[in-house]
Image (spheres, helix red, strand yellow):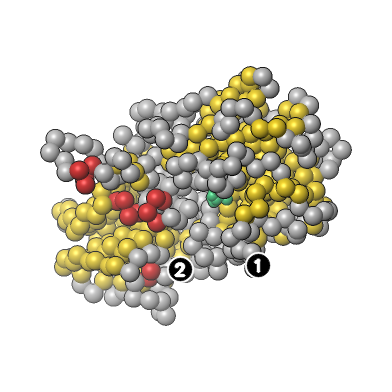
Amino acid sequence: MLNPAVSGFYPDPSVCRVGDDYYLACSSFEYFPGVPLFHSTDAEHWAPIGHVVTRKGQLSIETVPTGGGAWAPTIRFHDGQFWLLVADALGRGPLLFTATDPAGEWSDGLRLEGANGIDHDIAWDADGVCYVTYSGLLLEGDDMGRHLGIQQVRLDTATGKALEEPRSMWSGTGLKFPEAPHLYEVDGRWYLMIAEGGTERGHGISISRGPSPMGPFESAPANPIYSHRSTSHTVQNAGHADLFRTDTGWQLVLLGTRPGGMSQMFAPLGRETFQTRVTWADGWPVVEPFVVTPDRPGIEVTTEFDGPLGGEWLTIRDAVREWATVTDGHLSIVADPAGPAIVMDSAHPRFVGRRQEHLGARFAARIEVGDGVGGLAIRYDERHHYDVEVGGGAVTARVRLDQLEHVWSATAPSGPIVVWIEAVPMTPTPGSEFLDLSTCDNVRLGFTADGVDTELAVMDGRYLTSDVTSSFTGRICGVYATRGTVEVDRFEYAGRDA
Ligand code: 6LW
């Protein structure tokens, strides 16, 4: 099957089927719009159709800390409508959204009560009783950080209230962080599938089965039934899966990363979505091993801002973006006069960007800052970003790594200038130093004026990876304004894996 199914920062996939249509949802954390949705008619090629979170108020998007926000949706179709559960982690908490058209609009989000945790699954038995099964990682109250294992309640979906005290469920084989539970009825048996081992290299999928949605569940003898841990597979962290049936058999979607390096490795794109087939033996699912599809074509996209920003454009903790307007082939970003001197250090930068979706990637923006300051930045979070900034007569490349900052500057030419950031995967060449080989990529920072490219700096890319930052997201690259108004009339993204 085609892999990645969806490349770039698209973790925690969940799929539901409605007739001949398949819908896929992923996490989005502090980014807006939130909870991206994809559609497929062959359960293999996925096209974006919109987002669940398109309005202020659906999530606590303005205030969630880095790493919080939309975690791990479950999407299902039941009783004539779509249901999507997602935790607004460190924000509103667990939420239930509904829609009749998955392309939108979705509801405001009903807060679940009595089911505290993350990764909420929703399932119904033949009598219409609704079961919500979730990972009991407490993210609020005095017990914050405590993990109660996999939990379950029956839910009143009209009020969002649990109908009982949570009960403890089968929670895997004892590996860390039992999470991502999904409950399925298959041929008269109930299956409880989870992820365990942590979302890093130890990640894996385990499953159990029982006579009812409440169990009791017996663990599959082969658990974990799938993992890439301790292998040299190009896809690591494989886990957090959702299972579904197609006309030709069973499949699952799961998250994984594509780290680069040598012994220790680093994943520039964060957690992506992969897919594979599933067969059954002795009443247990058997996950077919998968590989990254070789020779996937690259893409080149140019945005000339001749219409509203598409769904691929993200803002950080901002669902309104009134400071970003598109008119006459220009994206104008108006800086916050009270914003900090290094706006990308802030939790609320006036920044509009898109995902890095390929291991090799080049972003270029033609910008004009007038007497303001702004530029192009690639970020994991406000403590880890590389910028190319124009202002005060200079073009400055900046690297921010936590409290450390380093800059390289050149004189800025007058008029519009093309600033660019390029991720170049590390490839072994004779004479390479070990420290070169041990990273995933190098990030070049520079600008072009009068047809001449000036490289200001080349920075090891490992500091912008999920492994170093510990952020749950991926690389996002875009334009920002620090002072005054920054005009952007062209933005290019070229990406290729090989
Ligand atoms: C998600 C949990 C996990 O809720 O990381 O891989 C958390 N798994 O299941 C955030 O994506």
Q: Quadrant of residue 349?
A: bottom left
Vertical position of residue 359 compared to residue 354: above or below:
above
Question: What residue is shown at x 43% (from left), y 38% (from top)?
Answer: 236
Q: Tell which of 317 and 226 is nearer to you.
A: 226
**Does dot 1 land on a helix, a strand or a loop?**
loop
Horizontal relation, residue 345 to residue 14: left or right = left
Three-letter amino acid code of the residue under disc 2: Ala
Q: Residues within 10 Å of mark 1 (few under 14, many from 20)?
A: few
Vertical position of residue 440 compared to residue 274: above or below:
below
Residue identifier under label 2: 347
Residue 250, percent from left and from top:
62, 25
Q: Tell which of 343 and 465 is nearer to you.
A: 465
Residue identifier under label 1: 141
Distance between mark 1 and mark 2 Cα atoms: 24 Å
In the image, the residue with mark 2 has its CB under 8 Å from the nearest atom of ligand 1: no
Can residue 486 be seen here? The reply is no
**Does dot 2 land on a helix, a strand or a loop?**
loop
Q: Quadrant of residue 16?
A: top right
Image quadrant occupied by the C terminus: top left
Three-letter amino acid code of the residue under disc 1: Gly
Residue 210, percent from left and from top:
75, 32
Badge number at residue 195: none
Question: For the image shown, how many numbered marks are present on the structure?
Answer: 2
